[in-house]
Amino acid sequence: MNVINNKWIGSRTIRPDGADKVTGRASYSADTSMPGMIWGKVLRSPHAHARIVSIDTSRAEAHPGVKAVVTAKDIVEFPLDKSVMLGIQDMRWMSRNVLAREKVLFHGHPVAAVAAMSERIAAEACKLIEVVYEVLPHVIEIEEAIKPDAPILHDFLSFEGKPSNIAGKLEHKLGDVEAGFAKADVVIERHFKTRPVHQGYIEPHSALVSVVDGKAVIWSSSQGQFMVRAMTSLLTGIPQSDIRAIPAEIGGGFGGKTIIYLEPVATILAKKTGRPVKMVMTRDEVMRATGPTSGSMSTVKIGATKDGKIVAAQGTFYLQAGALPGSPIRGAAGCAFAPYDIPNVHSTGFDVVSNRSKVAAYRAPGAPIGAYAAECVLDEVAEALGMDPLELRLKNAARQGTKAAHGPVFPVIGFVDTIEAAIAHPHYKTPLGKLQGRGVASGFWFNAGGESSAQVNITEDGNVAVTTGHPDIGGSRASIANITAELLGIDYKRVSVLIGDTATIGYSNLTGGSRVLFASAMVVTQSTEKVIKTLCERAAKIWKIDPEAVVWEDGEAKPAGENAGKFPALSLVDIAAKASETGGPIGAGVQQNTQGAEGGFATHVCDVEVDPELGIVRVLRYTSFQDVGRAVHPSYVEGQMQGGAAQGIGWALSEEYLYDKNGKVDNASFLDYRMPVCSDLPMLDAVMIEVPNPKHPQGVRGVGEVPLVPPLAAVANAVANALGKRFYSLPMSPPRVLEVLDGA
Amino acid sequence: MAKMHVATTINGEPEEFLCEPHDSMLDLLRGALGLTGAKEGCGTGDCGACSIMLDGRLVCSCLMLAPEAEGRKIDTIEGMAQGETLHPLQQKFLEMAALQCGICTPGVLMASRALLERNPDPTETEVRFWLAGNLCRCTGYDKIVRAVLETAAEMRGAA
């Protein structure tokens, strides 16, 4: 049963949701409306740090057209001294991020919200809410926030016995680094800084909520309808059974939509008014008040012997959490050295709060920051040793059996393959001109498994309807259609794939951690196997033979063994037509906490040219080499690799938040926050290397996040190669490049 | 404030609507007219997700006031396919996976069609500069540029 002949797996089919998306018919959250719908708008803090003395909403409530106002007193309070975790999120911080309670902690922090007959009236009414603030000193940058005399954001945080903005620490240790460095012939230690960057999804956050008879229905843009349901339930007190969260099509997330902002606020407004409430953020609100990823301050020290063997690595990574604890130090400290077999490792992460918006996940959270520092130092180690940088990586590459400092012993992995492919690729041999340079870097990401549910039903006319529980952010429905068609031996066009809402499919964890195809393919495969078993049983019933004497081949039930050839094969259509008389509807579901997601590795090669007059760094060539496990739909795997590379190029060269002296973001627009546009980039070549994950039925490894891990260092190393000067801070934007060149 | 009456043509059909003087064309399209294919990514003309054609010229509908539609011809993504038949660009975007989340896709398609109407044989650089006003965060633009070039080649071959 289920012999993979690879007709559909690995084929570049047209995605099931494609036609809707190219014709404008796909329904995103903000595209949804309801009869009687009114609009909500958020009042945001004008201060970076202030105590809320009082809030008077009476003038706003009396304003014509206003239907309701909410403040933090309307949401469930989570006392500061008791942690309530939901996944990796602490509801103490989540509730205070949704609506400020004791203090406002960043410019743009939500303070109240209004529901009114129009968006304009709601915005006008927000201005009528009178908030008395006691303005407090603020702190934005890490180096300031960790000073002993820094303004302290939270009285309840202390570090080493003193009030502090350091909210947490994480350490990974392997071997003895001091002994390791003592053996090294070359030791290089450098300090690095990166700026917070935004995920930059083009679709702003949005939610439409209707509450009738105490039961809420939520249409919102999120990476997890079950996360929306759970968090909204906790913050509003409405039981999960009375909340139906519907995953709209999602216009990009990259991790930034793994938490909620508007959903509980709109739910309370809808409950208060008895009318559906729609809330859509402006771009300005997205930039000011939704999670970027952390800015960072890091120190990395690497030691190697003359023959190029890395003997010790040490890293200290301070990451900005924004105003509330929870920066991705695990990604930075855990992934920085993970690609290498290093006997002595000491990697430490510090979670630092400051008066910026709370960070949210961004594609391999923390890992690009760790890799930036580690891979730049490795480049200098290679230089010092007179070794080719890829040869150095190859010599030290983690392989099957390597013990990583963050815990696991790697199973079958394809890291070496990515380096060898890079060395052999024509890109690596292309001659470079004046002011041009080449950089390489590698990267690792953990990848996740976790809870997923699927239901596979045979329609009465003999086609297939699959439902899974993960918002499809980059083509997962297409991959699920390929897998189901492959297993059933039918044309993929006969498979429809839908994303269920919280009422129609079992619990499924977030679209995140590069887990969606890994986990959903696992439960879809098991469901389909059950369906095939049923199909064989039904055929056996029709033929009046033993079910064990039936096989499923090429989309048909065939008699086997001594019955072989005795009956004409029965197709899916034939069996579906007789489903009622042979036992009823045919379908199966599987719900599981999936295990066996294995890490992902990539190696990137980047060529740049620097314009010394304008300070512009232009990427000339870019090639990514990634162990993708199994490319179920190669186009969308390449798409992940290309998209991640582009985001990394933006992080390296142009993206950053600029703050004024009052702690207000100065560049909260796409014009001023400079993400790469089409004319900034070359073609982004993606070389997929397939080393199947042995713990997955199709060999799937997560592919979505690794692509953002190497680019920062790949670009930085290329710039260093072009100029013969190193940058230790990102972005390498034109003003910074000119500063460094002028300092020559 | 009295609403303004506007008579216009949208995707070849006569259309009338009432609007406030300050309403954007994007507000009207997505609201009263129910044409939600144009998206609001920024509202400041930086992302191009709301791209439409106004009398044959590519504009950001978020920067256009709704009353400006009076007597003009507007084309939106909803009018790009002819019935069931997709425009060659739409078809090629699907075949070459030139979209991921799809939020920028309507705007990118409108802009790409506008380019090919003016320049049926663009170079890669011309495509990249023409589409520089349409932000896409998912694809890194690679597959978009390839799909536009490939469509242009096919359309020239068919002409």
Image (cartoon, rainbow, N blue to C red):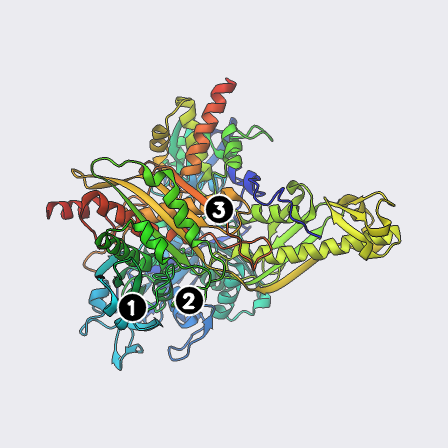
Q: Does A502 appear above or below A485?
A: below
Please tell me the numbered disc located at residue A352: 1
Q: Residues within 10 Å of mark 3 (few under 14, many from 20)?
A: many
Chain identifier of the residue bearing label 3 in the image: A
Mark 2 and mark 3 in contact? Answer it, CB < 8 Å: no
Q: Amino acid at mark 3?
A: Val
Residue A9 position in % (x across, y down): 59, 45
Residue A485 position in % (x across, y down): 65, 46
Figure quadrant of residue A256:
bottom left
Q: Residue at x 55, y 30 (%)?
A: B86
A110 lies left or right of A699 = left
SS type, badge 2: loop
Q: Residues within 10 Å of mark 2 (few under 14, many from 20)?
A: some
Spot the residue most to the top: B159
Mark 1 and mark 2 in contact? Answer it, CB < 8 Å: no
Separation of disc 1 and disc 2 at Cα? 29 Å
Looking at the image, is mark 2 or mark 3 earlier in the sequence? 2
Looking at the image, is mark 1 or mark 2 earlier in the sequence? 1
Say which of A183 and A730 sits in front: A183
Please tell me the numbered disc located at residue A637: 3
Chain identifier of the residue bearing label 1 in the image: A
Spot the residue most to the front: A307
